[in-house]
């Protein structure tokens, strides 16, 4: 009888299950990308898809909220519950990121859907465990086969926190291996009590 190597855990599938089980989360997102100003926001999500984004930089003080029941985004340029208030569609270019991200498709679940789609047309490599900030995380690389690109991404590198299973860092690359974006997720809080959640407008 030969010893067969154990298969690598499916960290992406496990993270999807963790996301499916949560009710809400809050996190600080720090995004860097070539040719664009760094972005830092306080991000809140509540099922079935409510989103609140409070900008730290750029546009310090501005707040975006998305309501899945109305399908509309509200923008407070000078802070939540102040005037003026702009009501926009989520596909408005005014509120899309330089990478084309939309507020209604900005949560961890939407990211994992894209990664899973890339897995179906590519290869998944478990690199090992690394320290990301204060987190011990499993490093996974998903690379698409030529001719298959998901939302402009050819390769994802993800670091999944070993304690809660969700990503704490994500880096994406295009077909020419050019960096697209790197996102750090800090101070992630899952299933925050309702009294501690920032209102969603």
Image (cartoon, helix red, strand yellow):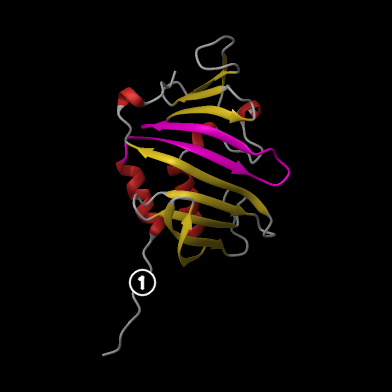
Mark 1 lies on residue: 7
Residue 180 in magenta?
no
Q: Is residue 40 visible?
A: yes
Can residue 120 be seen here? The reply is no
Residue 24 picture quarter: top left
Q: Give 158 or 146, whichever is nearer the viewer.
A: 158
Q: Residue furthest top?
A: 83
Q: Secondary structure at mark 1?
A: loop
Name the image quarter holding the N terminus: bottom left
Question: Which segment did they paint magenta?
Answer: 22-49
Determine the residue located farthest toward the right in the rendered image. Answer: 35
Q: Locate the C terminus by quadrant.
A: top left
Is residue 160 rendered to the left or right of residue 147? left
- Image coordinates of residue 50 in percent, x first then y, are 42, 28
Please, which residue is most extreme toward the front here? Answer: 134
Classify 149 as above or below 200: below
- What residue is at 30 percent from the left and 85 percent from the top? 3
Please name whichever residue, 20 or 147, is drawn nearer the observer in this view of the structure. 20
For the point 45% across and 43% down, which residue is it?
108
Residue 29 among those drawn in magenta: yes
Question: Does 83 appear above or below 99?
Answer: above
Instruction: Tell me the chief SS of the magenta region.
Output: strand
């Amino acid at each position: 009888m030969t010893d067969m190597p154990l298969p690598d855990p499916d960290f992406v599938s496990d993270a999807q299950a963790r996301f499916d089980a949560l009710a809400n989360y809050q996190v600080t997102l720090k995004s860097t990308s070539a040719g664009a100003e760094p972005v830092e926001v306080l991000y809140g999500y509540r099922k079935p898809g409510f989103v609140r984004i409070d900008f730290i930089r750029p546009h310090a003080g501005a707040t975006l909220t998305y309501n899945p029941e109305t399908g509309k985004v509200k923008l407070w340029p000078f802070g939540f519950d102040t005037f003026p208030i702009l009501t926009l569609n989520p596909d408005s270019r005014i509120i899309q990121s330089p990478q084309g991200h939309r507020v209604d498709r900005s949560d961890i679940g939407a990211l994992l859907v894209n990664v899973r789609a890339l897995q179906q047309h590519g290869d998944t490599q478990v690199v090992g465990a690394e320290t990301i900030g204060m987190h011990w995380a499993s490093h996974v690389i998903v690379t698409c086969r030529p001719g298959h690109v998901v939302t402009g991404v050819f390769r994802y590198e993800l670091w999944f926190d070993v304690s809660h299973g969700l990503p704490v860092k994500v880096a994406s690359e295009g077909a020419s291996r050019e960096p697209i974006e790197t996102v750090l997720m800090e101070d992630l809080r899952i299933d925050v009590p309702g009294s501690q959640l920032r209102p969603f407008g």
